[in-house]
Amino acid sequence: KLISSQRSSNKHYSYLHILALRAILNLTNVIVLNSVSYREEVQHYLPKQVGIEVIPNGIRIPEYIQSINKIRDELAIDSSSLLIGTVGRLSSEKGLELIFKAFSQSKHKDAQLLITGSGPEKNRLEKLAITLGIDDRIHMIGFRTDIWSILSSLDLYVHASIFEGMPISVLEAIAVGCPIVATDSGGIRELVTGPEHGWLVAQGDFIALVEAIDNALDHQEEARLRASRALEHIKINYS
């Protein structure tokens, strides 16, 4: 039997791309999705005669993380400074432009933003940071393998994807107890099911994203409480 998978709703696919993909998927016996949340969104290009199974992403919760403040030391970020971060490919669907603009409008003008990952949008994002006047507070550190240590150094994890499957980076951030602000996109809503687990905002809602970031940073005790509930949620359902 031939098994294929689709890892997100792929809203950026062109009509020709969809036709080609459907032709390929017609040759398979089973298509595996990693989240039930976007199943309806992909129905228009999945062959009706092929079976669909959902196998959610999972994660092993780390028992111990070394060098928690290594990245702060490396970048000379004071331990008292608020550090916001995100991890992922630097591509348009990840909503990094929205994060940059929201960060520039946050009232926390001493906060720092850490971008971990590489991709085609790097140069454009660097220019955007200069235009927004926040280039002195943004650290774009490229691809890294010490993700657990980096995530453990953050005060807040922000994920603003336009579309998603079930993002491993959000699972990893929750696994180290980091508070989450994210767009209500794909499988994210299965990980952050409501305000008890973090802050969810509508896709592309700039004002709501700014408010959520400020709310989480203003109420850090509440943010940690939501993060601990989210951790218990993924321990039970995704580990």
Image: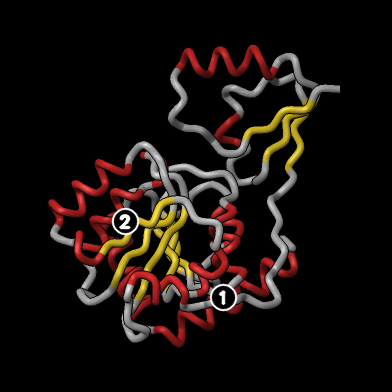
Name which quarter of the figure residue 112 lies in: bottom left
Q: Residues within 10 Å of mark 1 (few under 14, many from 20)?
A: many
The label shown at residue 99 is 2
Provide residue 232's location: percent of width, then percent of height.
67, 74
What number of labels is visible? 2
In the rendered image of this protein, does residue 26 appear above or below residue 182?
above
Question: Looking at this rendering, what residue extends furthest in the right direction?
Answer: 1
Asked if residue 220 is positioned above or below residue 129 in the image, the reply reads below
Front residue of this view, candidates 184 and 86: 86
Q: Secondary structure at mark 2?
A: helix
Q: What is the number of the mark on residue 177?
A: 1
Which quadrant does the N terminus fall into? top right
> In front: 66, or 117?
66
At x 76% / y 20%, what residue is drawn?
A: 28
Residue 193 in view: no
Q: Position of residue 87 (x, y in %)?
A: 46, 56
Q: Earlier in the sequence, mark 1 or mark 2?
A: 2
Residue shown at 23% from the left, 56% from the top: 101
- In the picture shown, does residue 90 fall above or below 171? above
Q: Is residue 123 left or right of residue 92?
A: left
Q: Is residue 126 left or right of residue 212?
A: left
